[in-house]
Amino acid sequence: MTTLDYFQIFLFIALIIGLTPVLGTFMYKVFTGEKHLMHPVFGWLEKLSYKVIKVNPNEESNWKSYAFGLLLFNLVGILFVFLIQLVQAQLPLNPANLPNVSWHSALNTAISFVTNTNWQGYAGETTLSYFVQMVGLTVQNFVSAATGIAVIIALIRGLSRKTTDKLGNFWVDLTRSTLYILLPLSILFAVVLVSQGVVQNFNSYETIQTLQGAEQVLPMGPAASQVAIKMIGTNGGGFFNANSAHPFENPTPFSNFLEMLVIFLISGGLTYTYGKMVGSTRQGWTIFMVMMFLFVAGLGISLYSEYAANPVLGNLSAMEGKETRFGITNSVLFSVVTTNASCGAVNAMHDSLSPLSGMVAMINMLLGEVIFGGVGAGLYGMVVFIILTVFIAGLMVGRTPEYLGKKIGAFEVQMAIIANLSTSFAILVFTAWASVSSYGLSSLNNSGPHGFSEILYAFTSAAGNNGSAFAGLNANTLFYNLALGLVILIGRFGVIIPMLAIAGSLAGKNITPTSAGTFRTDNWLFAGLLIAVILIVGGLTYFPALSLGPVVEHLLLMK
């Protein structure tokens, strides 16, 4: 690694730390109804939205009504995106005359984008028209991210309020997240991306002649607008098949750095919003530092593995699957950031990562993507581990577990365990199924432990709502489209519904005043215990599967 590589990593971390309270304070004002910078700009549109959908913004609901509105909204989104793919050949803005999408690929894509997963078993530029990309996928990039933010805001209200069953209004939280946070940031970032060379047009594909005299078709389209929200909303996916390795999506080292930075931007800021809304910024910073510690640890292991002497490659660093304009450090940093944050965008092929680097990417997702995680999703996933941690701490000292003055009872622990087990069940059961079935094995590009890693990575990415892939697996088959679609649904709503139930339960409880015997949750002792619980739970659950894939592959490589 060069001095410039170290400087870039330090700059990246410093900017995330510096921007967290800035954006966090802004989001706090948005969700508490205080005056903020964007209200004069989009306030009128917020009011118009409530009139159109006939919603009273002052009317709040309990957790069941909140969950019903969320599920209904997502169901409508899945049906809409599914249908427009089936008839895209008859819709406008299709200059490449692309045919209709198969029903199972359309269903998988609809589920994937509505759940903020953005898993793609197809090449975007040869499968989906501009109309579907914009009206279907880009719209869902906004509202799926807003849905995740709405859930964590409802959970925060459950933690901070007392003796009530009201968690807010889903439609208000969804609207404010979209209009005041996601839309302004995306507009600004899209303009920056266009300045760097990301394409944004409605032109037909262009045919050019290469220096060798061959003809090459260059895809066009409104890419910058989708790239902006896919990064900011931690959606992932790619307008083009090569994703952020494509020069039309990510042309320069500067655009590459900014794309990584904005992936963490909202997720980091929400930790500060969390602290402000529960009445203690120390709580938010404690969570932030746990996330940052795990991020730095994973990044260090990945960088060491990629730069370490590799006997198979003549003790040279591995550049396979990486863009020369980004190099090893930027490729590894991107892989760790995107798998930490439930984004799924990639600027290098994860299939070509060293076994340990590939394992770090998988572990980032297997832990529930709580290391910053998806916007909103990472933080409410972290609350699952916080509940388990205070429960364990309570058992250790013989006290009823408490968090933020709320008694953590059997119901909260049960819901937290359901949220944790739903994803692990989906990952392990479906990986096992695919690994022993002919229709699961027929899509593999590799055999042995690496082939197993491809299958494990695919279902891990789906259950974690990440969307990245090892790229060695042909997932655009009937089996994988349906199996991965089901796992995506389990990974998303198998966590959201229990978390809203926890929010509703906690909101109805009184707040116990802090005493000398209260177990503090805003110091390094709790942070260390939380890190241990995250790693132990993840290790006990997934180590056997990892040992069959990347661990064995690493040992074979070294031998």
Image (tube, rainbow, N blue to C red):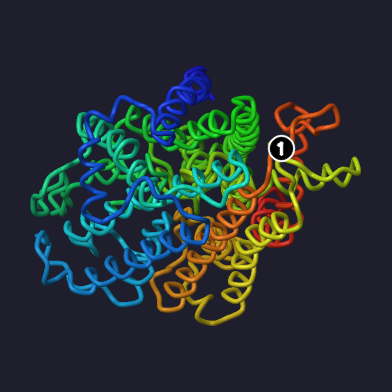
* In this picture, residue 127 sits left or right of residue 339: left
Q: Quadrant of residue 90?
A: bottom left
Residue under pointer 1: 405
Mark 1: which secondary structure? loop
Q: x%, y% of residue 452?
A: 60, 65
In the rendered view, tell whether residue 92 sits above or below residue 170: below
Considering depth in this image, is 460 or 204 the residue closer to the camera?
Answer: 460
Q: Nearer the viewer, residue 334 or 236?
A: 236
Q: Can see residue 312?
A: no
User: From where the camera sits, is residue 518 visible?
Assistant: yes
Is the residue 268 above or below the residue 133 in the image? above
- Identity of the residue drawn at 29% across and 40% down: 179
* In-front residue for pair 397/64: 64
Instruction: Give the left or right position of residue 507, taking residue 440 as reference.
Output: right
Residue 432: x, y in percent? Answer: 63, 73
Quarter of the N terminus within the rendering: top right
x and y percentages locating residue 253 in the rendered image: 35, 29
The amino acid type, in three-letter code, at marker 1 is Gly
Residue at position x 51%, y 38% from top?
332
Front residue of 286/307: it is: 286
Above or below, 419 relative to 213: below
Mark 1 is surrounded, within 10 Å at the Cα level, by few (under 14), some (14 to 19) or many (20 or more) other residues, namely: some
- What residue lies at 57% left-to-right and 46% top-to-bottom? 380
List the single residue furthest toward the bottom: 438
Q: Is residue 476 left or right of residue 270?
A: left
Q: How many marks?
A: 1
Return the x and y of residue 365 as percentages of the image width and height.
57, 51
